Image (cartoon, coloured by chain):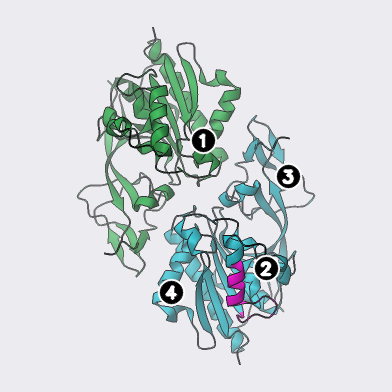
Chain colours: A green, B cyan
Amino acid sequence: MSIFSQVAIVGGTHGNEFSGIYALKQWQQNSETVTRSSFSTELFFANPCAYQANKRYLDCDLNRQFDPKLLADQSLANYEQSRAKVLNQQLGPKGDPRVDLIIDLHNTTSNMGPTLILLTLDTFNTQLAAYVSERMPDAVILVEDHIEPIQQAFLCSVAKQGVIVEIGPQPQSVLRHDVMESMHEMTTHILDFVHLFNIDQVPELPEKITGFRYTETLHLPQDASGERIGMVHQHVQDKDFVPVNPGDPLFILFDGSEQTWQGDYVAYPHFINEAAYYDNNIAMSMAERIEINTK
Amino acid sequence: MSIFSQVAIVGGTHGNEFSGIYALKQWQQNSETVTRSSFSTELFFANPCAYQANKRYLDCDLNRQFDPKLLADQSLANYEQSRAKVLNQQLGPKGDPRVDLIIDLHNTTSNMGPTLILLTLDTFNTQLAAYVSERMPDAVILVEDHIEPIQQAFLCSVAKQGVIVEIGPQPQSVLRHDVMESMHEMTTHILDFVHLFNIDQVPELPEKITGFRYTETLHLPQDASGERIGMVHQHVQDKDFVPVNPGDPLFILFDGSEQTWQGDYVAYPHFINEAAYYDNNIAMSMAERIEINTK
């Protein structure tokens, strides 16, 4: 019996990230492209109401609602909070899920290229990362394992295993040909790998690959009253996963002065100037570069 | 007496185009940067409610409400329709306006660089275009004179003279350092030119410059039921103002087939894949290349 017998591909978790939504439409008409003999694949449109409204979400970010405490709290019942509970029932429930693997499809306005986000570095994810990296040299592996997967608030954390396909840059509510092709390509590699893993025929993989591990989140400069007083410096704009040294400029204030990177390590910014994060005044995430050993 | 004695700089006509909104904030604190001795400058935040809602508009596109028939129709009273009547009163009224020149600040998600949009090619606009082009070599001059300025629906058509500063690419609801700098630079050149024009000291200008004249609008491919069945081809994505020959690919359908440019002229697409135009299923505008004579 396959380790991964039930796969779910989820699109439209954010209603204005169009690539996943349109990819689902195409796969609904050609379901053989996303199935393999060792598993079945279901397609889920996570937030159709937000898509109808042409917004990321109606009430709150659906992809932050899958923390087990939030799922258990029945008093949290706005649109996305309710939708999270429904999806948890359909795909999970978290902790004892029906679905073995969720592939959640996202876009970003940041220049992140095709990025595969992993919630943990177990054997499956490690080999998956190596398999995808080898076949898609421009792909970036981003590890967000600062929280246990079971405690994660991401939708994909509901299944036994979950990954995020995150492709940018693409403005909100736009469909780019190149971004769509990257999403198809990365999803296809993931599905191919799951099948090979299931039938115990994973090919020879590179012994180690380069990845990035999330470290912290930086905010846009604000004054004491909370007014935004600066923006991301052009020194880092569009330079996702390019190293920033302590002292390098990160922000330009409207008065012309600069703010520099104050950390004590070489950081790899990503989600730089992501439009959706302005709500929370977030400027970028930082990561450190890591080696991922596949043996 | 100056020909242009009253100038208005307008930002936030679209609530999610942040550069103009933040430029206004900066100029409110340093008003000397936008005034010159031969004219006074007022700053207008056209659609603050849309900005609060983090949307282009609440009810309808404010920058399409200044057609004289719409302004005269008191039954049109949704938020932007009402706001247009207020702005027409404050800046116009159209036909006999108080304000001599409106500079309306916009962003686009399209890769248009710094673009100066003119509604007519009279002596002032022609010389302005040459002055800006010479000082800002990456600037594009786009002429939208297929409608008489008085019949135009754009906000800037309310004053005696109106121009649009349109800078891209910038995602909606994002502030880019490079785009902000371009907006400052182009606006400064326009203000400098207005002053020189007022005091009859326009410097020697190139005899002719290259510009583009709007010809037509193309829509995204749809099926008979109105469902979108394709997207902008990567052959033209990000290639604003790059020539397209008859027969060149413009769209890729989700079934893998291509649609080509069917016009009988070499076209210069712009506003390619602009996010805000998806509402109306618009894919891009086309233009022809023109020579603008300044003598």
Q: Residue at x 48, y 69 (%)?
A: B184
Q: Which residue is mark 3?
A: B261
Q: Are marks 3 and 4 on the same chain?
A: yes
Q: CA distance from mark 3 to mark 4?
A: 43 Å
Q: CA distance from mark 2 to mark 4?
A: 30 Å
Mark identifier at residue B71: 2
Q: Is residue B131 visible?
A: no
Crowdedness near tag 3: few (<14), some (14–19) or many (≥20) residues, C-alpha within 10 Å:
some
Q: CA distance from mark 1 to mark 2?
A: 37 Å
Which comes sooner in the sequence, label 2 or label 3? 2
Mark identifier at residue A48: 1
Indicate which label's residue lies in the foreground, 3 or 1. Answer: 1
Indicate which label's residue lies in the foreground, 2 or 3. Answer: 2
Q: Residue at x 62, y 41 (%)?
A: B233
In the rendered view, would you say B144 is above or below A69? Answer: below
Q: In the shown orientation, is residue A213 left or right of residue A45?
A: left
Mark identifier at residue B27: 4
Residue B215: image x %, image y %? Answer: 74, 57
SS at mark 4 in the image = helix
Residue A50 located within the stretch drawn in magenta: no
SS at mark 1 in the image = helix
Q: Outermost residue toward the top?
A: A1
Q: Which residue type does callout 4 highlight?
A: Trp
Q: Is residue A62 visible?
A: yes
Q: Are marks 4 and 1 on the same chain?
A: no
Indicate which label's residue lies in the foreground, 2 or 4. Answer: 2
Q: Which residue type does callout 2 highlight?
A: Leu
Quarter holding the C terminus of chain A is: top left
Which comes sooner in the sequence, label 2 or label 4? 4
Q: Chain of mark 3?
A: B
C-beta proximity under 8 Å, tags 3 and 1: no
Range shown magenta: B84-100
